[in-house]
Image (cartoon, rainbow, N blue to C red):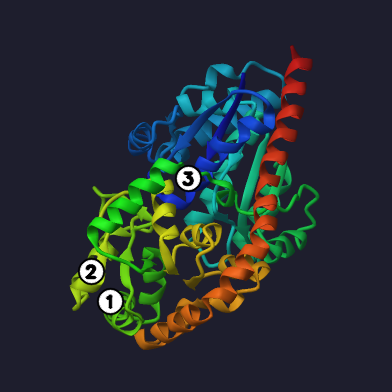
């Protein structure tokens, strides 16, 4: 039996991470030619167990909340790593389910969407390093699946990246910009790959259910909006009133285009307050500011990643600040208009020939500007769709490289284990 432990991908909360996890579940067994046991090492264990159960997925969840990782698991992993180095017994230190699961796995797949990026908080960059140090110290190979990284100009980020990244079995940069940043670190363990979510499968019954749900709430054509609490936080730093701009946009775009606006929370924690993993409070704020309520269908809930993709597939255009909402749009041949915060958006859109579909949050000046951009995308929709259709096969083939890499590293890991026995 092949066992893979995953890091960085909760199935609850951020549905971008859940999309990558779903893709892993969908595609890895076929690549390795047999059953794969997935153990999710989770920062949200309770919510994740419920989310996997709701989705009918057989995934074991073990807890690695940040505090317990920093205070318990990292010290034990360092001590175990030292004992391994001097060839002394160390398994008695595997005192938590997460440490035991990571140690016993054939491979650890890090599904973080983005890591080691300048400008993020100091504690986040330290966490990016510690989370992969644990399996490395325990002797379990780590593959960083497709994700954005860099730049590496700030001292802490550069030092931790240089110490950490060469020790990983393989790293898959997601896009040319990230690859350039990583090549600058002189890394030898790089295999570029597309975002894993490009190959997530959506069951037919989910599509049927979503189509019926939308029809019951109002007739199309639909335009979907995916706001982001992360972008709102960045906007606050520049005194940009993101919620009001998005609310005014919803009011004006419905009148200007005749489309019904569907608002989704692509990262949702219904029982939690405002945080970077929860767009629901922001969506509630935007919905409260909307004047023309008849223009808006607000899907107020925690939808599965497959359900969110099915909603987006029913849209003429997606206006998104969440990265993986954009990935779903591309996968479903829906033109996106993206309001983002890092290079990770542009490096995906550029190979599709639609880099002009992305703006940065500091260009978010007025709702009218976004309405005009949306009308432009609608007017050129056929051109956008053609470019997406032409380039999607390459993006999906690149996405499948993740599973080639995982299968190759699993073979190496299992071969080493057999030799040890």
Q: Which residue is mark 3?
A: 202
Is residue 66 found left or right of 193 in the rendered image?
left
347, above or below 67, in the image: below
Marks 2 and 1 in Cβ contact (< 8 Å): yes
Q: Position of residue 272 (x, y in %)?
A: 26, 50
- Nearest-to-viewer mark from 3 and 2: 3
- Nearest-to-viewer mark from 1 and 3: 3
Q: Position of residue 109 (x, y in %)?
A: 60, 38
Q: Is residue 13 visible?
A: no
396, above or below 286, in the image: above
Q: Position of residue 179 (x, y in %)?
A: 72, 60
Q: Which residue is mark 2?
A: 287
Q: Residue at x 23, y 59 (%)?
A: 217
Q: Residue at x 42, y 48 (%)?
A: 305
Kindly state the secondary structure of the residue where label 1 is placed.
Answer: helix
Q: Is residue 148 visible?
A: yes
Marks 1 and 3 in Cβ contact (< 8 Å): no
Cα distance between the residues tagged 1 and 3: 30 Å
Cα distance between the residues tagged 3 and 2: 28 Å
Kindly state the secondary structure of the residue where label 2 is placed.
Answer: helix
Kindly state the secondary structure of the residue where label 3 is placed.
Answer: loop
Q: Quadrant of the C terminus?
A: top right
Q: Which residue is mark 1?
A: 247
Instruction: Specify which label sits upstream in the sequence, 3 or 2.
Output: 3
Is residue 192 found left or right of 240 in the rendered image?
right
Instruction: Specify which label sits upstream in the sequence, 1 or 3.
Output: 3
């Amino acid at each position: 039996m092949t066992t893979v432990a995953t890091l960085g991908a909760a199935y609850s909360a951020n549905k971008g991470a859940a999309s990558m996890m779903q893709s892993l579940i969908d595609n890895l067994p076929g690549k390795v030619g047999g059953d794969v046991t997935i153990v999710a090492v989770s920062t949200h264990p309770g919510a994740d167990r419920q989310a996997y159960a709701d989705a009918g997925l057989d995934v074991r969840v073990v807890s690695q909340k940040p505090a317990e990782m920093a205070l318990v698991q990292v010290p034990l992993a360092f001590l175990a790593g030292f004992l391994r180095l001097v060839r002394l017994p160390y398994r008695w230190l595997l005192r938590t389910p997460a440490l035991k699961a990571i140690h016993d796995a054939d491979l650890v797949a890090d599904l973080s969407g983005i890591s080691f990026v300048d400008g993020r908080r100091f504690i986040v960059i330290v966490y990016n390093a510690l989370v992969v140090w644990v399996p490395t110290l325990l002797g379990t190979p780590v593959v960083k699946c497709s994700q954005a990284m860099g730049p590496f100009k700030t001292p802490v980020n550069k030092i931790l990246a240089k110490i950490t990244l060469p020790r990983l079995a393989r790293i898959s940069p997601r896009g040319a910009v990230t690859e350039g940043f990583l090549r600058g670190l002189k890394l030898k363990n790089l295999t570029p790959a597309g975002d894993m979510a490009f190959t997530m499968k959506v069951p037919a019954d989910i599509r049927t259910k979503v189509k019926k749900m939308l029809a019951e709430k109002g007739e199309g054509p639909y335009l979907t909006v995916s706001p982001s609490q992360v972008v709102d936080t960045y906007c606050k730093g520049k005194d940009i009133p993101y919620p009001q701009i998005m609310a005014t946009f919803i009011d004006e775009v419905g009148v200007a285009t005749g489309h019904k606006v569907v608002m989704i929370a692509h990262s949702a924690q219904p029982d939690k307050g405002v945080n970077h993993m929860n767009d629901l409070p922001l969506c509630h704020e935007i919905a409260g500011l909307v004047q023309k309520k008849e223009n808006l269908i607000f899907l107020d809930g925690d939808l599965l990643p497959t359900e969110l993709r099915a909603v987006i597939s029913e849209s003429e255009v997606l206006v998104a600040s969440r990265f993986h909402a954009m990935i779903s749009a591309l996968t479903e041949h829906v033109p996106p208009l993206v309001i983002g915060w890092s290079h990770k958006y542009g490096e995906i859109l550029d190979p599709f020939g639609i880099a002009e579909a992305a703006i940065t949050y500091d260009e978010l000046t007025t709702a009218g500007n976004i309405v005009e951009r949306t009308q432009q995308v609608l007017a050129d929709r056929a051109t956008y769709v053609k470019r997406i259709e032409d380039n999607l096969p390459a993006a999906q083939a690149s996405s499948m490289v993740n599973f080639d890499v995982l299968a190759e590293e699993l073979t190496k890991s299992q071969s080493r284990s057999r030799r040890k026995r």
